Image (cartoon, rainbow, N blue to C red):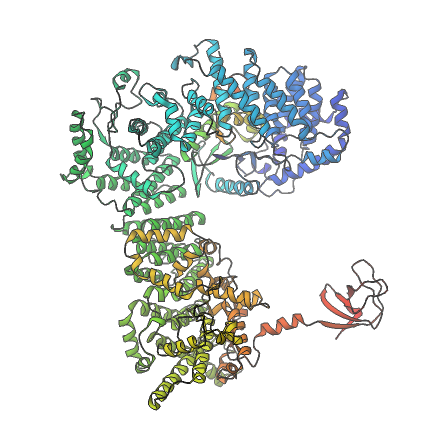
Amino acid sequence: MLLAVLFSNTDGNILIERFHGVPAEERLHWRSFLVKLGAENLRGAKSEELFVASHKSVYIIYTMLGDVCIYVVGKDEYDELALTEVINVIISSVKDACQKTPTERLFLDKYGKVCLCLDEIVWKGMLENTDKSRIRRLIRLKPPTDF
Amino acid sequence: MASGQESAGMTLMDLITSDPSAAATSSSSTAAPSTLGKPVITEKKSKRATLMQIQNDTISAAKAFNPIKSYPQKQKKKPVSYAQLVRSIHELAATSDQKSSQRQLVHHVFPKLAVYNSVDPSVAPSLLMLHQQCEDRTVLRYIYYYLARILSDSGAQGLSPGGGIPTPNWDALADIDAVGGVTRADVIPRIVEQLTAEALNADIEVHARRLAALKALTAASASNSEILGKLYEIVFGILEKVADTKGKRRKGVFSKGGDKESIIWNNLQYAALSALRRLPLDPGNPVFLHRAVQGVSFADPVAVRHALAVISDLAARDPYSVAMALGKQALPGGALQDVLHLHDVLARVSLARLCHTLSRAPALNERPDITSQYSSLLYQLLLDPSDRVCFEAILCVLGKFDNTERTEERAAGWIRLTREILKLPEAPSVSSKGSQPKDALPPKPSSEKPASKVRRPQPLIKLVMRRLESSFRSFSRPVLHAAARVVQEMGKSRAAAYALGVRDIDEGSQLHAYAENIEFLDSDPHDGSQSEAIRKASLLSNRAGRLDTIAGLLASLMEVVRMTVACECVYVRGMVIKALIWMQNPHESFEELKSIIACELSDPAWPSALLNDILLTLHARFKATPDMAVTLLEIARIFATKVPGKIDADVLQLLWKTCLVGAGPDGKHTALEAVTIVLDLPPPQPESTSGLTSVDSVSAVDPKSALALQRLVQAAVWFLGENANYAASEYAWESATPPGTALMMLDVDKMVAAASSRNPTLSGALTRLQRCAFSGSWEVRIIAVQALITMAVRSGEPYRLQIYEFLHALALGGVQSQFSEMQLSNGEDQGASGTGLGSLISPMLKVLDEMYRAQDDLIRDMRNHDNNKQEWTDEELKKLYETHEKLLDLVLLFCYVPRAKYLPLGPTSAKLIEIYGSRHNISASAGLNDPAVATGISDLVYESKETPKGAETIDPDLAMAWVTGLEDSAWGSNVPAMEKVNEFLTGAGTDAPDVEEENITSRPSVTYEDMWAKTILETYEAEEDDARSSGTSSPESTGSVESSISSHFGGMSYPSLFSSRPSGYGVSQQLEQRSATTSSRLGNTSFGGPSSTSEGLGSPIREEPPSYSTSVLQRFESFENPLAGRDAQTFGSQDDADGSENPQFGKALYDFTAGGDDELSLIAGDEVEIDYEVDGWYHVRKKRPGRDGKMAGLVPVLYVSSS
């Protein structure tokens, strides 16, 4: 189960969040936990370098993409490596949507597009599409495989 | 732009709209509400007020959403509000045919609206209108996005399950706004209807919209059965049309080619299976299974992934029918084989899980052909290029499938890993259809597929080890973390195998031997049945070949694992340490592990949650292998010394306890030693002087961790006192030494020598505690003295005498220094002096004095009777019995002892007590306080000899049976020991394990306490009991696993060690009162008057330095001579209680007219009863109602003279 996908800026402001199966009262904990994790480890990190953390049986993979921090949280079949798949898909389609490694401004300008991409990637707590070009087609309401 | 410092503290909406260009356009769209009337607008206008109201809500919600505190900021641009966005949608929807409107929607309105987790239902009509009329694909894509959000919104305060800034609670507002309010209930059916119609539309031209509509529909909550039904209908409808194609399959399809029709079908297949995956499983439904199985052969990789996931979920429930439905798919050439080459990691992961489930399913035991197909598939996945898939396959082989831990399954996994020989046709990356005809032979009973000549058969373990080793060389942190986790799971399986006594895995034996044998076997294909025998035989073959033994492989793997500790990510390191702990063999030296951990812990980067997690790993490791208790305790000690501030003392105590209980008869001494080593720690050294890696140096340089270390030491001391008797198997009530012999040993040296020769464990613990009582900090000394008294009460001679001597010396030391202070006093208070424990010790000493005196009396009486050849009269017996009972009550003030067994008068009294007890039908557990005895009824009931067993009482014999059952025999072998511990751990919170765990010490005492709490205590007050709880066996020990994890040590308040449970002190005190009332004779024994000694000792408050927290003071105060002062009424608690009960009366001084409902009018001279005072007002009660009929209310304090 993909519990959460979260985007924040370098100051720890949350830009996008998608939770699944996390009770509302726990979300605040997750937000602050993740933001703290990022603040402690992501400073000076290379873009797209993956970081890992775990909390009990929950795994967290996070990274920095330009000015944007991305966190994914999962458990069970979404372990570190599956989350790595997820975050790689997210990274590639965010870059695709922004046309390059995003600055915060660029990311916010493409906010809607990123949301749509995310909608295609994570669907009800499961990874859906992984192919960049397929996602690009889907957010334009074209069929996944075009003819 | 607005990034960096400037944006700190802004809301998300601020951030998004802070772009000048974007803001300019958006404000032009929103700030100029056009007058392009139309129905939508009028509806909107009626809601204008509501919208404004909502706008405020939303902005504040958006601010709250930001977890980082928001600073007051100067806003350059007004952020677009939710209400403005909504208004724009309504307006633009009306003009959706214009290009500019569409652009406006796509570029400004929809993206900004996405900040919110959902939109409110009032937007839905406009969205639906756009959905029908708009042609622009991007607009439509957003429409589906928002419709899905509305559907998924559960309607609770606008807080959708997805997260994001909450939208206002529209339903509530719409209800209030009766005119034209739109609620969810109104729009959901419309949305569903429209989307359903679209999802059923078979027109090829719009099939992309069809997919999107279906997807949006699945967002609806699963609780809505109506929508679910519709969804099933749609999905199965689509699948019926498209699933049955004989897939002209693969490869070609994705590369541009492929006819249009089949591509559309593929897309529909994908959409249908994706939707199916999101629908609840329908295990009994053959159609469901059938469609999912068909999905495996679909062309779309995502569809295949979903199909496999669904099937593997189903297989967990009904493996047989799944295997039947899959039929030949698993055979070479079948669809499952194709999945091996599918470029979708999660699909292969699902395949691994499916194969594992089916190959291990008991339901398929009859069909070895099927299970072998699947295990062969599983082994092929071990060669998968993706680490994720390979690790999943390894975990499956190891028996780690889901979160349920079954030891047998795990042990079988280890055997499989170490025994299995793999003969794979070719690496899947190379294998292709070419090899399939050759492989498509009927599968043989032996689990391997026929070997192709290319690859030598390999031992499974070698393959796995090699793979793991190469993973550990990766630079990617996730891969390292995952690999360490796999090693940890391997360690778990190995431990399980050992625990089950699978000893015949000779890790030193050679692997090639098997391989060759098997190869030999395979050349003779009819001979599969003998393979097992030959494998066993091959175990014996013993050619030296260091690297090819299991032990050699493991060693080289562990070498790599250890190197990984150098990773800079603490989580990876944490996982590595866990893996090392699990892979640690009980018989190997653990010096290396110890030094690794000690070295690691010096790093300040470790978060405390992770450290506690590792401590719990130690705990789990102990559960698996109780042999390792001492090793693990040593490791735990490193945590205690290195990072005292970060670990939870409760987790540590839990570990200690479990280890002590589980360590077995021989291990108990060592286990206790390991715990008490904490006490011998040298004081923390400055960081510079201590070697970083030294295990024994304590690093607690900052005040916080110094305090935490202090707390750990307290916990250890307490633990020692509470459990020393258990560890030493020494109990007064089982001691054979007659009391007289103790007196002969009054020579101190002899006494100590006798003690240590009789029971080194106990005397060792005693020595440690004595040292703590002398030299520890204030808090430690208090606990040490309490621990000592506990031991004194519970142990027989000569320990009791030894402790008595010691305590006596301590008390005297205190007195002497006080005297000297008085003499030398030059008017200055010299502060703390002596041991400072006088007031604590004196009541304890008095009890011991009482016991010894009573023992002497008894011996004298017995001698008299013997000399005079006199029978004991009933009156004498009664007196004796009463003394016995009284002493028992006193003893129980300090710690728990089993009432029925404990003989304060010494073993010789047993007979007389028993005679009296049986003569008068007194149950041993209840004693004189048994109401029947107290009222004399029991004397009338001579017939019934059976001890009444109330539901609330634990039969002490039963308790003792537990004790003895546990004592030595039960721990003789490991397996039952482990089961016991497991029972204890899994049964957290139940009653029974506590008895096991704590032995006799505390659980029954709670029962007694509860009993008394129920029967006697009415005026019980929790606080006072808390303050007085010191002497009893602490509730800490009685807590279940859960309760002890919840922090009793939380905060610095020391008494929390003896946390909130109503404990024995207060209870016994009540009990004492009762016994005083029921039998008056007890009252005037030697306990009566406060003696001068106790007065002298009982003035502790001046002794102690003022800096201690009030709780300690209060607690200490409460200790002020609780025993001596019955006449003097030093029980402040009772005074207080009475005081609060006492009504206070007063008289109205002046007339007062009530100014409000809660006030009360008074006429001068009215007699009132004052209930309480609050802020300058009395709440008073009049004798009779006044003119206004009111009896009680508030009056100003100054108007009433309180008497």
Q: Percent x, y for residue B64?
A: 62, 41
Choose between B465 and B871: the one closer to the eye: B871
In this rendering, the answer to whether A74 lies above or below B875 is: above
In this rendering, would B494 be left or right of B1110? Answer: left
- Residue placed most toward the observer, B205 or B54: B205
* Above or below, comparing residue B990 to residue B1066 in the picture: above
- Lateral position of residue A29 relative to residue B358, left or right: right
Say if B1154 sits above or below B551 in the image: below
Most extreme residue toward the front, as rendered?
B943
Outermost top residue: B259
Is residue B497 toward the left or the right of residue B715 in the image?
left
Quadrant (top left, top right, bottom left, bottom right) of the N terminus of chain B? top right
**The quadrant where residue B968 appears:** bottom left
Where residue B468 appears, as percent x and y from the top left, is 30, 35
Q: Nearer the viewer, residue B98 or B68?
A: B98
Q: Is residue B812 visible from the viewing direction of this image? A: no
Image location (x, y in percent) of residue B803: 37, 75
What is the quadrant of residue B167 in the picture?
top right
Work out which quarter of the rendered image holds the C terminus of chain B and state it. Answer: bottom right
Is residue B958 at all visible to an observer of this figure? yes
Please state if B568 lies on the left or on the right of B417 as rendered: right
In this rendering, the count of numbered labels is 0
Between B269 and B253, the one nearer to me in the picture = B269
In x, y percent, where is residue A31?
A: 54, 40
Looking at the image, which residue is at 57% across and 40% down?
A24
